[in-house]
Image (cartoon, helix red, strand yellow):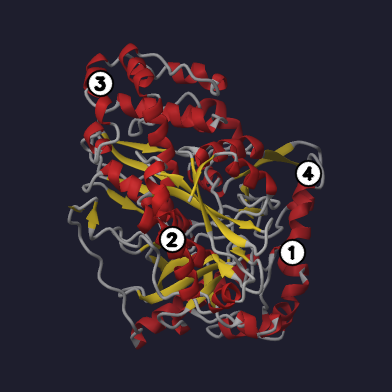
Amino acid sequence: MSPPVATSPVPAQRAQADGVALKARPIAIPPLTKLTPELEQQVKDRNTKTLNYLINTNSITRYFSTADKLAPLRAALNTTAQPTDNIYETFRASVSLSTYKDYEPYIRRFLASKPLNKADVEDMFAPGLPFFIAHSSATSGKTAKLFPKYRHPAEVSAGSAGVMGASNPELAPGKKSLVMYTMRHREVVTVVDADGEKVKSIPVCLMSTGSIRMALDMELDTDSYRMQYKVPTQTSPMAICWVADYKANLVLHAFFALCDKELAFGSFVFSTILLDFCRAMQENWVMLVDCVEKGVLPPVDGYEEVREQLERHVSPHPDRAAELRSFTSSLNDQGILKRIWPDLDSVVAISSGIFFAAYPSVRHLLGPDVLVRSLGITSSESLFGRVYDVQDMNLFEIISGDEVIEFLPADEEDEAEEGELVPVAPWEVQVGKQYEIIPTTRDGLWRYRMSDVVQVVGFHPTSGQPVVRFRQRRNVAIRLANEYTTEDELTQAAAAACKVLGIASEFTVLPENEHMPPSYGFVLELGYGMSADPLIPLGPAARQAIQSQICSANDNYKRELASGKLGLPTIRLLAPGTFRDYRDIKVRESKSGWGQIKIPAAVYDERTKEFLLERVVAEL
C-alpha cells in the first residue's frame, strides 16, 4: 500500500468559490525545500534548550522518578554531568517510544478517591497540581483518555498561546467576535491537604475548555460570577458557555449574533459546527428575528439554568429586525452571511482532512470575501502546529520552544519491530515524506505516540521548523479482508464522490459485512439546498469514482476487489442535519462540552451505525 501524494481535498483558498474569485490576501513566503546550515543550527539550539528545560523541570516528578520507561534515561543522567549541549543524543539513546498504557496507572491515581490527598498526586507528571485534566473526545466509542495539564511559565508557552490567541484575535474598535466555546466539565477532582482542607478543584474537561480556563485564570469557584458577564468585544454573553444542550447553544449564539451588525470575526473550531450554526439560524429564522425585535430570549428548551444571567443582556432592536427580515427569502443565497454581517472578514473553521466536505457549503454561505482559516493542529495530548499561511487551511509550522517534537517515519512501522522504531529530529525530516508526530511535553509525556500523521512539505524560512500538512489519524481505518484502508484514503475517496455528486456537508464510512462479499458503505449528508432525487442517476458514477480512487492509492484493496473478497462500495444519502443531531446526542451522553464531538472517517460501533442508517433518504 502506498499513500497518495495528493494533499488534503481542500488545502487552499486561492482559486474560486462557486465560480467567483476569492478576495486577494497576502501570500506567505513558500517554505524552503532544504535547511541552510545556519537555520539547522537554530533548530538544534532551540531543541536542546527546550529538552534541557523539560528534563530539569520534570525530573522531580513521580513519573520521571519511578517509571520503568525512563529508567535508562535516569541511569544515563546519573552517570554524566548535568544536561549539556549533547543532551539530545543522551535522550535519544535512552528513551523509547511510549503509549497511553505507560501513563495510565499514574493517571488513575487522580480518580482513586474522593477527595484526593494532595500528597498522593502532587508532582505526578509536572511540578505541582494540574490546573485541569483534559479528556479525549472518545468519538469512536472508545473510553476517553485523560491527560493532566499544568500551568507553565510564559517563556515556554509562547507557541501554544499564539494558537489560542488566533481563536479570538484583536479587532478594530467597535467590531465584535462570535467565539463558540464551552466551559462545561465532565467531573471535578477535589484535592485536600493533610487536615482535610480543600486546596484545589480540578475540572475534567475538554482541552479547549481547560486551556481557556487556564489562560483567563478561571477557577471553578468563579463560574457563578463569570456567568453574569459579557465581554464587550463579543456578541454572546459568557453564560452560554455553560449551556449543556448543543442545539440550544446554536440558537442562542445565533440570536445574540443577529442582534449585533458589527460582527467581524467568528470562531467555530470546525466547519461542521459553522454549518450547524447556520442551519439553526435558518430553521429558526422567523422566531429569531421576532426575538431580536422584541428583546426577548428565544423560546427553546435547554438553557433554563442560565436564563436569568442571559436576560440582563437582552434589549429590543426593531431597526435591526427590520433589516434582517429583508433577508428572509434569500437565506440560501451565496454570501448571505456577509450580507447579514457586512463587516465579517474571517472565521476559524477547520475545513481540511475529514472536514473537507463541509467547505463548499461554508464557502457558499460566506461568499468570496470572507477568509476561512484553520486554528492549528491541536489535540488533548499536545498542541504542536500553528497556521503557516492563513489562506491555506492545511499548512502548519511545527511549534518550537514549548515541547520537543520528533517524527517517526510512517512507512517504516510495518517493517520494524517496536524496539526498532526510531524517531528523527526536526532537522532530519525529508520533504515529501510522512511522519507520525512524537511529542515530549511540558505535561510529562515522553516520546508519546499520538497516531497523528503529517507530511513534510518544507521548512519555515526564518525559524527553520518543519512545515507540514496534516494527513490522518493512524488508528482510524477499515479492514474487511486483507486490505487496510486509512483515514486519508477514505477521505480522498469521499472527495472523489463529492466531485460527481456536488456538495455534501459531512461523510463517514460504515463497514458492510452483513453480506458477501463485504464492502465499504459511504454515507454522505446532503448539503445546503440539495435534494436526493437529482443525485440518484449519478450514483453509479459516484460509486465508480470511490472505487477508482481507493484502487489508485491502495494496491491491497485493488487486489482484494479483483479477487472477489471485497464488493463494490455503496453510497447512502443522509437527511440534512443528521450529523448535528448526532453531535447533540453525544454531548448529552458525555456530560461535557461539544468542542470535540466529531464523526470519525470510519464507524464501527453499532449504535452510531443504527442512528445513521435510520436517517438514510436515498441509496445510490
Q: Residues within 10 Å of mark 2 (few under 14, many from 20)?
A: many
- Mark 1 falls on what kind of element? helix
* First in residue order: circle 2 vs circle 3: 2
Query: Residue flagged by tag 4: what amino acid is it?
Result: Leu
In this rendering, position of residue 512 left or right of residue 112: left
Query: Residue flagged by tag 3: what amino acid is it?
Result: Arg
Query: Residue flagged by tag 2: what amino acid is it?
Result: Gly
Q: Nearer the viewer, residue 119 or 475?
A: 475
* First in residue order: circle 1 vs circle 3: 1
Q: Residues within 10 Å of mark 3 (few under 14, many from 20)?
A: few
Task: State the separation of the CA atoms marked 2 and 3.
Answer: 44 Å
Whether residue 436 is situated above or below residue 186 in the rendered picture: below
Query: Residue flagged by tag 1: what amino acid is it?
Result: Lys
User: For the point 22% across and 48% down, which residue is it?
Assistant: 368
Task: State the separation of the CA atoms marked 4 and 3.
Answer: 56 Å
Residue named by callout 2: 159
Residue named by callout 1: 101
Task: State the separation of the CA atoms marked 1 and 4.
Answer: 22 Å
- Total marks shown come to 4
* First in residue order: circle 1 vs circle 4: 1
Q: Nearer the viewer, mark 4 or mark 3?
A: 3
* First in residue order: circle 2 vs circle 1: 1
* First in residue order: circle 4 vs circle 2: 4
The image shows residue 369 at horizontal and vertical percentages of: 21, 47
